[in-house]
Structure formats: structure tokens, C-alpha cells
Image (cartoon, rainbow, N blue to C red):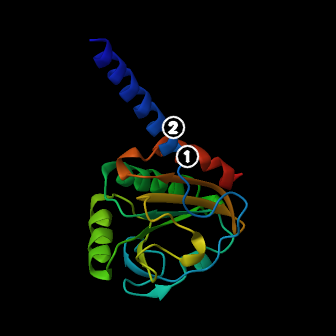
Amino acid sequence: MKRLVACTVAAVMMLGITVVSAEEVKSGLQSGAPVGPFNVEKLAGADTDGVSIGANLCYRCKNGARPQVMVFTRSTDAKVVNLIDQLDAAISKHSKKQLRAFVNYLGDDKRSATKGAKELAGKSKAKNVPFVLPNEHENGPDNYGLNADVEVTIILAKGLKVMASHAFTVGKDVNVDAVVKDLAKILN
């Protein structure tokens, strides 16, 4: 019986350690780093942004120094959809500050990544957020340092500099409230 209790306590402690380390996952550019250009293909969303579906461009460049949120995802989880919808609402609410966001879908091959991006766009109610496929679709732009073991990386930038970033090993763990709270760092 003592052995069973000891094993249970050890398992709970290991779970606690796992939760802590999950919060410490790093992916993508970190605070203070410059945000470099990278090209993407627009697949869906943001019908009024002046960019046609199928166009290849640099959205980071199009957004310039405006406050912007770059979401890199391999997940279509409901938490990711909620985050995108919250960002879309923030874009409308902060139109005078010219807030922008775009969702980069990542995947091992172009066909499945394109399918995933379109599925995510279909689940979302976002009107102002484009869904794109980075030309480097396997793991995003090389100079962004995205962790291949992380499903969702979010970079918040202003003035072409990272102000905050978040990384989540799995889509269901996305902390939407924390990301939305960090919008204040790029809107002030």
C-alpha cells in the first residue's frame, strides 16, 4: 500500500513538472528581436484587404510597422479558432491603431497544409484575418526559429520588433486570455 501511495505521489509530481515545462516551451522570435520578411500564399479570409486568394506576398511587409499578430499553427483545435476570432474582434475594436493579424498554417507537405488552413478558416468567423501558407510551409520562415515540436506559436510585434511571444505544444493548450492581454503591449 505504501508503495502504491509513493508511486501515485511520484506520478502527480511528474505531471506537475510536465505542466511547468510546457509553459516554458520556446518557439519563434522572442521579445526584442526584429521581425524579418517572409513570403506566403494567401489561401482564405480577409476579403477586403486588397490581396487576392492565391497571391504570393509578404504580409509582414504589407503590415509594415503597424501592430501585428503572427500566428503559426499546425492545429485546427477550438482554442486556436477562439484565438483567431478574438484577434478578429480586436482588429475591429482597434481599427484606429491599425492592428493586423495573419494566420500561417504549417505542415509537412503543401497539400495537407493548404487543406488544414482552409479547414481552420472555415471554422473561424474572422472577417479581417487572412489565412496563409508560408513558402517555407514545413516549419515557417527559417529565420523565425519556430520549434518543430510546437503546434502553435504566436508573435506580437510593433514597429518591426517582437513585443511578446507565446508557444503551445498542442493547440488545446492555447491560453487565449494571455495572448489577448498581451495585445496591450503592441497597442500602446
Nearer to us in this view, 100 or 174 = 174
Compared with 113, 157 (above or below) is above
Residue 139 — which label? none
Nearer to us in this view, 41 or 1 = 1
Residue 20 — which label? 2
Nearer to us in this view, 30 or 48 = 30
**Residue tagged 1:** 24
Please tell me which residue is depicted at 68% across the width and 50% down the height of the picture.
185
- Residue 159, image x and y in percent? 72, 67
Is residue 75 shown left or right of residue 157?
left
Given the image, on which type of amino acid does mark 2 rest?
Val
What SS does tag 2 mark?
A: helix
What SS does tag 1 mark?
A: loop
Given the image, on which type of amino acid does mark 1 rest?
Glu
Quarter of the figure with residue 131: bottom left
Please tell me which residue is depicted at 49% across the width and 63% down the height of the picture.
147
Please tell me which residue is depicted at 59% across the width and 79% down the height of the picture.
62
